[in-house]
Amino acid sequence: MTAATNIPWKKRIRILGIPVDRVEDADLERVFHHFLLDGRLHHIVFARRSDCMRARCSKRKRRILEEASLVLPLDRSLVWAARRLHQEAPVRYLPFSFIVRLLRFLEEKGERVYLLGESPQDILTIERNIRETFPGLRVVGRYHGNFPKDVEDTILTAVKKATPALILIGSGIRGGDEWVSQHRAELPPAMVIVHPETMQVFAGRRKRVSPEEFYGRIPPLKGFVLNPLRILKVFYYLWFGFLVMVYKVFGLNKSRDD
């Protein structure tokens, strides 16, 4: 089931038995270069705590993460859990900054990107903004989201013929990361990222998440003022923390294949 466990400069750890990858910031371009040259599809997933919790109970969700070449944690609680489970703490990357860094890397190589998802108008705006921001990067195709099922095969064929180095996917693709997992055999050897929020930033419809907010430099009280609904997550945090302690005490933190 695992797609790529022996990638240089990457270490796969387990949190509640679910795969999460550790890549040092200094090694990120080396990983990009490896993905670019090895002729395989590389699904890059940004995983939240909720994704790991769902994957414990859903074979389908677990398969997505097991098959992904890179599973990057979004939540600080996943870093905390890794430490409690005596794993090397993974590095968190702000998704927008990560994707911009990847686009700049591909631009330097004169590579190609295919854009998929969002509304017909937004995908045009995204294409224009990417062309202006990364002039050395070739946008070799685009298709909006929420397309009829009967054109899906045509889109997959178009993506494959375009031979992009990166397929960047936004909203409007049924299942998101699950869609990528289902169509692995029909997609070309490329890096694939599903991240609607980044696509919507490129479309000018969403404000970027600040590094201060993402990396926790906004004081907790101010965070609750900005988003009072966060208080409702306390019980979920407690349940997650309890599970981490159970996995630690009983030595359950392993792959089901182990």
Image: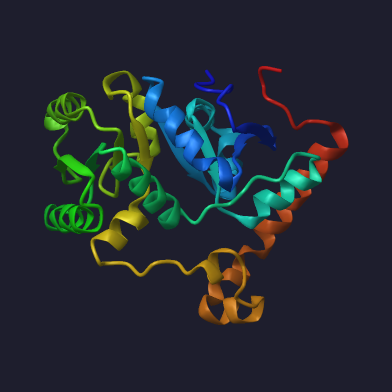
Is 12 or 147 nearer to us in this picture? 12
Residue at the (53%, 52%) spot, across then down:
93
Residue that protrudes farthest toward the right in the picture: 249
In the visual, does 155 lie left or right of 11?
left
Identify which residue, 98 or 108, lies in the foreground: 108
What's the residue at 17%, 33% (across, down)? 149
Q: Position of residue 240 (x, y in %)?
A: 70, 50
Q: Quadrant of residue 216?
A: bottom right
Residue situated furthest front in the rendering: 108
Locate residue 113, reporting x and y percent.
25, 40
Q: Can you tell which quarter of the image residue 35 is in? A: top left
Left or right, 253 with reference to 178: right
Q: Residue at x 66, y 17 (%)?
A: 257
Colouring convention used in this rendered image of the protein: rainbow
Q: 193 or 247: nearer the eye?
A: 193
Tell me the quarter of the image containing the C terminus: top right
Disc count in the image? Answer: 0
Residue occupying image coordinates x 22% and y 27%: 163
- Residue 164: x percent and y percent? 25, 32
Camera-side residue: 1 or 215? 215
Question: In the displayed structure, does residue 257 sit left or right of residue 120?
Answer: right
> Is the residue 57 above or below the residue 103 in the image?
above
Q: Is residue 3 left or right of residue 164?
A: right
Could you tell me residue 172's position as x and y percent?
25, 47
